[in-house]
Structure formats: C-alpha cells, structure tokens
Amino acid sequence: MNSQRHFIRVGFFSVLVAFSVNFRVVGEPTTPDFAVQSLKAEIQNARWESRFVQAKGQSRTTFNTNQANEYAETRFYTYKQRETGALMVERLVGKNSEIETVVGSNSRYGFRLKKNKGQAWILDELFLGRPRAATHANQPIDEFVLGQVSLGFSGNLMRAKDLGIRQLSKESGETGLLGFLFEWKVPRAKGTVQAKSRVYFTPTPSFSVARAESTFSQSDSRSRSVSEFVYDGKLGALPRLKQWTVRSESESAKGEKSVALAVHDIDLWLDTEVPETEFTLSAFGLPEPRGVHWPQRSYAWLAYGSIGMFLLMLGFLFRQRLRTWSPGT
C-alpha cells in the first residue's frame, strides 16, 4: 500500500510538471535565462486567464506491484474558484473504502471536512480569519485549485531550484513536435526531489503539451512516468484539456516495485459568478462559525413586482368595467 500511495504522489506530480511548462514559445530560446523568463511570464499569463475556470472530473488508477497484487482507485473531484475563495470536493473510492474530503476557503475562513460512506460531514479543521491556512498537497487551497484548472500552472517550476531548460534537437523529438528538456530540484520534507522531464509540444493550432517523459529520484526511491494529453478546442486563451493518461513505474527505498496506469477525464468551463455561499460550511449542511453571517439574497424585488402586477390588473379590470357600463345598466 505504501508503494501505491507513493505512486499516486509521483504520478500526480509528473502531471503538474508537464502542465507547468505549457507555455507558448516566443522566438527561439537562445539562452537558459531567456527560456526561464519566458516560462515564468507565460505561467503568470495562464494563471490570470484561469482564475474563473471551474472543473469536474474523475480518474481511475490501476496498480500492479511486484507481489502481483492489483489494486484500483477511482477519484471523483470538483474544483471551484472565485476571487474570494476556492473549493475542492474529492471522493476516493477503493476496494473496501470510500472517503470524501472537502477543502475550502472564502473571504472569512478556511476549512477541511471529511466523511466516510453513508456518514455525515465532520469538521476536521477550521481556520477562522485565516482562509489561506486551508491547504492541500502542501499548497493553500486557492493555489492548488488554480493549478488544477489552469492545467497545472501551480508554480512548481516557480519554486524549483537550479532549474535548467534547453531545447532538444529535432532528431530527439517526435515529428511535428517541439521538444524541451527540463531539469530541476524541489525541496521536500523527506528529501529533495531531483527531476528531469522531456516535454513535447504541439505548435499549432494552440501551443500545448502533447507528451511528457519524466524521471524522479528522492533518497532511495526512483520513478519514471510517461504522460499523454488530449484536448478539445479552447477555453478562453487556454487549450481545453479533455483527457490525459499517466503510465508510471516506481521502486521504493525497500525495493518494492509498482506499475500504474492512471486515466483522467476532465470537464472545464468558465464561470465568473459562482456565489460565495458555495464556499462555506452551510453549503454542506454545517452551521457557520459564531459571528459569521452571510448576506441573504433579497426578494424585495419579487414583492414590489407582485404589487405592480396587481395594480396593473386592477386598472385593466376597472377600464373594462367602464367600457361595458352604460346608463340604465
């Protein structure tokens, strides 16, 4: 099970890395400094374009270990965001378990909920007055959600150390694709992750990642993954991701080997008016923290409209009565 969990982290991280370099090349990157600066600028542009992108999807991961055991997990998820908050709702279904997790933030607080199948939501953590203290995958929830819906522009490479980028020769790339080699280090609690990724881009009709081949090493653990991506049109200025697959091979410090295949299907859309009440505890049937009151939607317009309609109807009936009235009636 530990090797399987390790596989989830490695495969997920490789996808983020592949997406994090989904930038448009402006001219030839003549020097590493030029490439890095172009990359950072494009990441910022993509993050700005993606701030109102919402997502819903599912992924199924099948594991095979060196003990010939097969294990599968299915993950259902929803991501929402607005200027004052972010929300992740995740349901993880295994062979003998089903766990749901919610991490959210709004303008007043952050929170984490959890529940098992058939049970009610339990408030796991509350960060009153500290919305960004609600985190997932070692990131504030707003950063995490933005990274997911913007195809992984989560800032992994922005936080990387000793980042090196160089363009691959045409002979080393696939036909019609632009290839780049990325090498970087990311500090982690259990040791620095050293990574190398060959990423191939489609230049037209929109510049996007087509394939990524990545290797990772951390302490005595090693892994390799190959990711492939399918798009369907565009979402604003971004390519609209439809599906991606990740094939991974991993070996833990204890010599445990695993092979995994993850298939992700995702639906992305733009919505600039998600109400803040959807990012609150009350949206999940729990009471709001003491002293927190959200503005209620006013229905005064409905009352005034009803009065207006009544007066119009009364005037119409009175007019009809005058028309039909005659002396002696």
Image: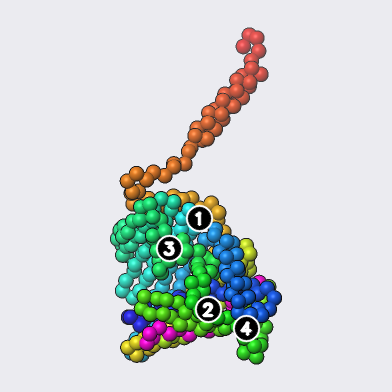
> Residue beneath label 4, please?
167
Foreground label between 1 and 3: 3
**Region in magenta:** 206-221
Element type where label 2 sits in the image: strand
Element type where label 1 sits in the image: strand
Q: Position of residue 83 (x, y in %)?
A: 51, 54
**Disc number at residue 82?**
1
**Disc number at residue 140?**
3
**Quarter-of-image position of residue 41:** bottom right
> Residue beneath label 2, please?
163
Q: Position of residue 119 (x, y in %)?
A: 30, 60
Callout 3: few (<14), some (14-19), or many (20+) C-alpha neighbours within 10 Å?
some
Q: Quadrant of the C terminus?
A: top right
* 301 or 26, nearer to the observer: 26
Callout 4: few (<14), some (14-19), or many (20+) C-alpha neighbours within 10 Å?
many
Q: Main secondary structure of the magenta part?
A: strand
Q: How many marks?
A: 4
Residue type, numbered disc 1: Arg
Element type where label 3 sits in the image: strand
Labels 4 and 3: the sequence-earlier one = 3
**Disc number at residue 173?**
none
On screen, residue 294 above or below 14? above
Instruction: Give me the C-alpha separation between circle 1 and circle 3.
Output: 14 Å
Instruction: Give me the C-alpha separation between circle 2 and circle 4.
Output: 14 Å
Instruction: Give me the C-alpha separation between circle 1 and circle 4.
Output: 36 Å
Cβ atoms at labels 3 and 2 below 8 Å apart: no
Is residue 158 inside the magenta stretch?
no
Task: Identify the residue at image location x=38%, y=70%.
Answer: 92
Is residue 220 inside the magenta stretch?
yes
Residue type, numbered disc 2: Leu
* 317 or 247, nearer to the observer: 247
